[in-house]
Every structure is written in structure tokens, then in C-alpha cells.
Image (spheres, rainbow, N blue to C red):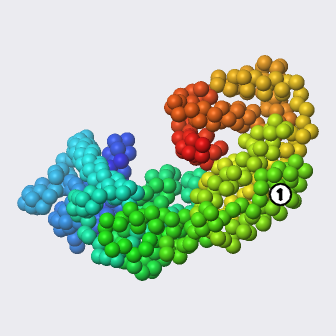
Amino acid sequence: MINVLIADDEILVRIGLKTIIPWEENGFRLVGEASDGNEALAVMERTPCDIVLTDIRMPGCDGLELIERIKEKYPAAKCLILSSHNDFEYVQKALRLGAVDYILKLAMEPEELLAKLIRLKEEIEAQRVSASAATRLEMQAHLYGKEVKEKRMRDLLTKQCTPGEIRATFEEFHIPPFTPPYRIVNLQLDAYEEVLEENNFQSEKLLSYTVANILTEILRKYDEGELVEIEGGRFAVITDYMEADMLLEMQEAVRTFLKLSVSVGYSDSLMSTDELHTGYLQAKTALEHRFYRGMGGIIAFDSLHYASPLETHVPWTQAQWIQLIEKQDEAGVLALLDRWTDSLREGPFRSPDMLREEWVELVHIFGHGLRPLKGDLYAVPPYRNRYPLHAVRQIETLEELYTWFCGWIGGYFQYYKTLATQQWRPEIAAVVRRIREHYNEPLKVSELAKEIGFTENYLSVLFKRETGETIMDFITRIRMDKARELLKNQHYKVYEIAEKVGYTDTNYFSKLFKKVEGIHPLEYRKTVLGRK
């Protein structure tokens, strides 16, 4: 729609103009009327106007003054003059001031006025398209340059680059040298996966863009530093501003504007830009210590003291856990978990990565405890929408992980008891057998139900009651079991494995795999083969 404003001191003229033209049918919207130039300008202050139909002779601010002020303040607006026979000199002056056309009031025909308006409308729309294309090109060029710079800076931080590469990048993107001492800061949006799942920001890209803008504004205020987006809600800052107030202000700004928590880790003082990678690793290590300290803190690398693997040991054996599991001693399991977690809180601290591997080992022990009953760890209902390995690898703090595990153990023992006493109906056993033998084919609940003579709804309810999980969850579990086996073979590509276990969409397969395991298929392969 093209916005139109009418300015004329004669009320009958204004009424006539409003009624003789079918405005909306022709793509116009009347946004206001005025009896003089000042009123017209007041309307334009409140509402954007594309076309102004204005009389020349009006009391106070007349048409000539109005046109002059519109061209100064709203240069894109087009002024169409309403004139009388004796206004010729004024019309000439108005055209010199920037009016685009005129029409004689007394001889005016609706068709003539509409034709002039439509011509102006087409001009405005063409200009908009042209301006939009130019803006898009300018934005694309800007974004491309920004993305190239960001990638180069990210490489300088995350990889070991030569002094020459560092110097060349700084020169190419006109980055002024940092005055020693400087440091690297890592900032992480806390509970990042949950923030994305809540979808308040519509997309991960929009969230990152918004956070980057906030952090950049703080850096500008202090006139210090380069911001680099790393990945997964994590940002790095290179800065020679060494006081904590800037970091506190960054945390507060994100909390105020986005209602999100940010954890911060920073490196030791660095004396040369050759130490960018070293500083980045220090800041990353400091940030990871939030696993012990909790979210929303600021952690210095020089405050960390991790024990070596030789200084630590787990205060339990596999036999202890298995004995408690076989006795179905849930209270005993929770007590042992309490003692272990207490020892982790007290130290000596292991690196979070090392500790997560110990929790992974514990998860496998719980899986081992189900084998005599031919149970499957992945059949234990997920707790708070997480499977155990996903929880161990993704939950961000020790306290959260401990709380999650305590909650999951209840479902584990419920499943254990079901296995110990279960006797499936023949129809359910037939469906289970069918899924196990044909997991790599398209499987629909309706077809499975038809094979055993049940309705789809009845089979779904009965299957859940007998096995403790839905049919689709069971199918997914069987497929993921096979996928884990295939990933141990380096010769298979991920898309081949996806097809072999029944998925034509590799991205969907990877997403499901991560939901179960907490890591993507290739990361799982590296973990398993590395362990071997």
C-alpha cells in the first residue's frame, strides 16, 4: 500500500478528494488530512507518507513552504500540487522546489488524478525494489566480509598459527595491535541446548546475532577488543582491558536484555600476539571449570588446580554397583552415588573431560547390570527428555548431573523390575521380533497392527503397557543399537549407516543419534575407536 496525505484548507476539497477516488482498490491508503502545512508535517511525524496532495495557497505554512520542508526532511516523499488557474508562477516555483507534478482543481477529473497517482505509485514501487536490491547486495558484501574475518580470527584462536599468519590477518582486516599485557576471554551462554529447545529466539543464528550485538556494544563502550563467535553459544574476546568490570557488564547486559545467564573464563596475561592459541586454550579450560563452580561465574585460568590421572581414582568398583543392582537396592545405589559425588566436590579436581569419562563408565556398568535379563540400557525411559549418555556428555555442571542421575535411577529400577517379571503376550513378542528382523525397512505402526489383527491404537497402548516404551521409541532404539555397531567400522560413511538402519535422511539420523548419545555419529566413532 502507498500512503497518501491530503493537505488543503478547503474542507469541501478534502471531502471531494477522499470520495472521488477508490483509494484502497488501487493500492492507496489515506493516512490523514490537514488544513495547512504545519498540520501536514505533524501527520508525517506520526505516519510515513509516500505521496502528499497539497494545495499551494493555504494560511500559515503554505504549500510552497510545505514542499520545501518535506524535501529537506522526507526526501523520498512525492508532492503532487493542487493548483488554481492563476497559480502558474507558484506552480513553477513548487516544481523547482521538488514537486513532481500538478493538477488544476477546477478542471480535475477523477480519471486524470488517478492516472497521475498510479504513475507515482509505480515510480515509488520501482524505487523500493531498486533500493531493496542495493541494500541486499550491500548487506551481503558486508556479511561476507564479516564472515571471512570471523573465520580467520577463529582459526587464529582455535589453531596453532605462525606469527606470519597472525600478522597477515591483523593487517588484512585492519585490526590494531593489542598493547601487552592482553588476554583471551571465553563467554558461554549457559543451558544453551535448553535455550534453543525453548525456541524463544526463532533460530540459533538469530540468537547468536543478538548476543554478538550486545557484547559488541559493551566492547565499544570500553573501546577495547575483538569479538569472535566460536560455536554452540560460545564467544571469544581478545582484549587488553584487564579489569573485571567489563566482563561483569557483559553478563549483566545479556541477563537484562535476553534473560540468559553467561559464564566467563579468561586466560593469564599474554605478552605477544603469538600466544593467541595458548591464551584461547587457557580461557576455554577456565570456562570448562564451571562444571564444578556452577553457571554464571567468572573464572580465571590461574585459579585452577587439576589433579593428574595418577592422583585420582574412583572410590568404587564395578562389582559394588552390580551387586547393588542385582539386589534391586535403589537406596544403596543412591548412597554410593552420594559418596562419590561428595568426593568429587571436595577434590582433588579432575578435568571435566576426564570426569565425564568416569560417568560414561558408570553408565556402561548400569547397562552391564541389565544383560542377565536381556535388557537394554536405551529401553530405560529417558529422564527429563535425556538418555544417560546424552546427559553425561551435555549437562553442564556436576550438581545438575548428580540430580539428573538420581532421577534417572528410579526409572532404571522400574525397568529392571519389569524385566525380572515380564511375560510378553505372543502378539507383542511377534511385533518385537518383526522389528528386530526388519529394522532397516520402513516400519509403520498401522502395518504392524494389521499383521497381528489389532487396531493401531490398541497395539500402541498394549505395546507401551507390556514393554514400557512406545513402538516408535523401540524402533529407534533397535536402529541406534545397530548404528553404534556399524560406526565401529571406519569403512562406512554416515549416510551409508543411516540407510542401513532405515533412514533416508542423514541429517534426521544424526539428530536422533545425538539425542540418544549426546554426540554426533562421527564424534561417537572417534570416542569409541580412541578408547580401543
On the question of residue 135 being in view, the answer is no
Residue 22's quadrant in the figure? top left
Q: Quadrant of the C terminus?
A: top right
In the displayed structure, would residue 395 be above or below residue 342?
above
Measured as percent of width and height from the top left, residue 125 is found at: 27, 45
Viewer-nearest residue: 233 or 127: 233
- Left or right relative to 415: residue 295: left
In the displayed structure, would residue 195 be above or below residue 430?
below
Residue 504's quadrant in the figure? top right
Q: Amino acid at mark 1?
A: Val
Viewer-nearest residue: 156 or 25: 156
- Left or right relative to 23: residue 475: right
Image point (55%, 64%), residue name: 288
Image point (38%, 62%), residue name: 277
For label 1, the residue is 333
- Left or right relative to 89: residue 169: right
Q: Residue furthest front?
A: 310
Measured as percent of width and height from the top left, residue 342 is found at: 74, 69
Image point (57%, 32%), residue name: 489
- Left or right relative to 14: residue 255: right
Q: How many marks?
A: 1
On the question of residue 471 being in view, the answer is yes
Measured as percent of width and height from the top left, residue 324 is found at: 86, 53
Viewer-nearest residue: 163 or 84: 163
In the displayed structure, would residue 411 be above or below residue 286?
above
Image point (70%, 33%), residue name: 478
Measured as percent of width and height from the top left, residue 78 is found at: 22, 54
**Which element type, helix, strand or loop, lies under badge 1?**
helix
Q: Residues within 10 Å of mark 1 (few under 14, many from 20)?
A: some
In the displayed structure, would residue 129 be above or below residue 483?
below
